[in-house]
Structures are given as structure tokens and as C-alpha cells.
Amino acid sequence: MSASKLETIGKFTTINDAEFARMLLEGEGIRASIADATTGSMLVPNVVGWFKLDVAAEDAERARQVFVEARRAASEVQDPSGLSIACLACGKEMPQGVASCPDCGWTYLGGEADVE
């Protein structure tokens, strides 16, 4: 990918969230890279928006659509066991079929991501 033709489509607070998003896009055939991944993880791993996900400018709209579809699909996932799901951040019960905790706002979708 040429540096002059890259577009940042997402900003992440952790390298893990950025890598997950990169793999999601690459699974859909969209080449993606994480800007400053090595520097960010060594120096200041929790600075908001430090890890930027870049794609070729011509793939940017399609990449954003992949994120929209992934969020929609995750929000429709239900627990087949019929048991409740506990929020991994606050531990409170989350209703079936939702991806975000109604109490603290944490989400299974990488809630610390800021997709542009």
C-alpha cells in the first residue's frame, strides 16, 4: 500500500482491538495496516486513538461497511444455552441479543474503537 493513498478508518486504544479489526478486514479481502503499532505498544499502550487502522483509499468505504455489518451481526447473536451473559467489564447481567452492557457501556465489539 502506498503511504500517499492510505486512509485511516478507525482508531483504537489497544493493539488487540486494532489487530482484531485488521484481521476482520483482511478476512474480507481488504488489506489493512496498523499505524505506529510497534511504537505505540512499547511507549504508551493506552493512549486513546494511538493505534490507527489504515486501508487503501479505494477500499475505505467497503471497510467501513464491513464494520457496520460485523456490529449488526454481533448485536443479533443470542446465547443458545438460554443463560444470561455477564459483562466482562462490570460483571452485571447483559440481556440476550445485545452486544453492549446497558449498565457500563462495555461492548463485545471492541467498544474502545472509534471508527471514522
Image (cartoon, grey):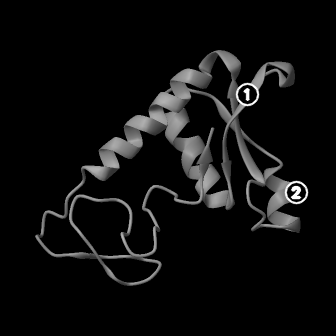
- Residue that sits furthest to the top in the current view: 58
Q: Nearer the viewer, mark 2 or mark 1?
A: 1
Tell me if residue 105 comes above or below residue 74 in the rendering: below
55 vs 113, left or right, is right
Q: What numbered label is drawn on residue 7?
A: 1
- Residue that sits furthest to the bottom in the current view: 91
Residue 90: x percent and y percent? 44, 82
* Sooner in the amino-acid sequence: mark 2 or mark 1: 1
Contact (Cβ within 8 Å) of mark 2 with mark 1:
no
Quarter location, residue 39: bottom right
Task: Give the residue drawn at x 86%, y 20%.
Answer: 4
Q: Which amino acid does label 1 sit on?
A: Glu
Tell me if residue 100 comes above or below residue 29 in the rendering: below
Tell me if residue 95 comes above or below residue 1 in the rendering: below
Q: What numbered label is drawn on residue 99?
A: none
Q: What residue type is labelled 2?
A: Thr
